[in-house]
Image (spheres, rainbow, N blue to C red):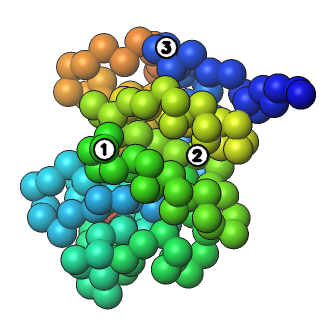
Amino acid sequence: MFYLAPVNVVDHDLYDDDWLKGILQSVKSVAIIGASANQVRPSFFVAKYMATKGYDIFPINPGQAGKEIAGAMTYASLADLPQPPDMVDIFRRAEALPGIVSEIMALPELPKVVWLQLGIRDDAIAAALEMAGIQVVQNRCPKIEYARLCGEIGWTGFNRRTISAKKPKLSKGFQHFGLKD
């Protein structure tokens, strides 16, 4: 009997900024499980923000399938997507994770990353995904991490733990930073 080690052993208590930035720079498409059509819900705001940063987003919400959320067509499940996503961002309670992971593992092409939103952590599920070669981020928000890593979150007075002289670019009437710039 032999033991298969995860592709990348990651400390889920402390993520390296370069590792998170590498993930956010490498993915092009994001499936958002639990996306809401309600514009004041965090899942809607994350979808809208990620779309403005150039990501192709695929909202997943069975009750909204066929309608638009944050300007993108919504699908009932991951299996219904027109292309495999690079990242799956999960806005569902931890109790829903086993079913979602089964759906992910049934895909013909696995995503590069599974991102569990703020308040969601399951080390056993993370280990299973990592054994399949999928990078996992737990208890974090990609919108917050993107804004922190590129400097936008510093505009509101948050300490982003990075010093930079990088100036924002004017784009469509608002200033923004980007990791891809």
Mark 1 or 3: the one toward you: 1
* Residue, disc 3: 14
Identity of the residue drawn at 51% across and 20% down:
12
- The residues tagged by marks 1 and 2 sit, at their Cα atoms, a distance apart of 20 Å
Q: Quadrant of the N terminus?
A: top right
Distance (Cα) linking label 3 and label 2: 17 Å
Where is 181 relative to 121, above or below?
below
Question: Residue 45 location in percent, x, y?
Answer: 23, 54
Dividing the picture into quadrants, the one containing residue 21 is: top right
| Mark with earlier residue (3, 2) | 3
Asked if marks 1 and 3 touch (Cβ < 8 Å), the reply is no
Quarter holding the C terminus is top right
Please name the residue shown 60% across and 31% down the image.
Answer: 127
Q: Give residue 95's mark.
A: 1
Q: Secondary structure at mark 3?
A: loop
Question: Mark 2 — residue?
Answer: 113
Q: Is residue 39 visible?
A: yes
Tell me the kind of residue under disc 3: Leu
* Res. 21 visible in picture: no
Give the crowd class for mark 2: few <14, some 14-19, many >=20 residues within 10 Å.
Answer: many
C-beta proximity under 8 Å, tags 3 and 2:
no
Q: Nearer the viewer, residue 119 or 55?
A: 119
Q: Residue at x 30, y 24 (%)?
A: 154
- Local packing at callout 1 (Cα closer than 10 Å; few below 14, some 14-19, many 20+) is few
Q: Residue furthest front?
A: 1
Closer-to-camera residue (179/109): 109
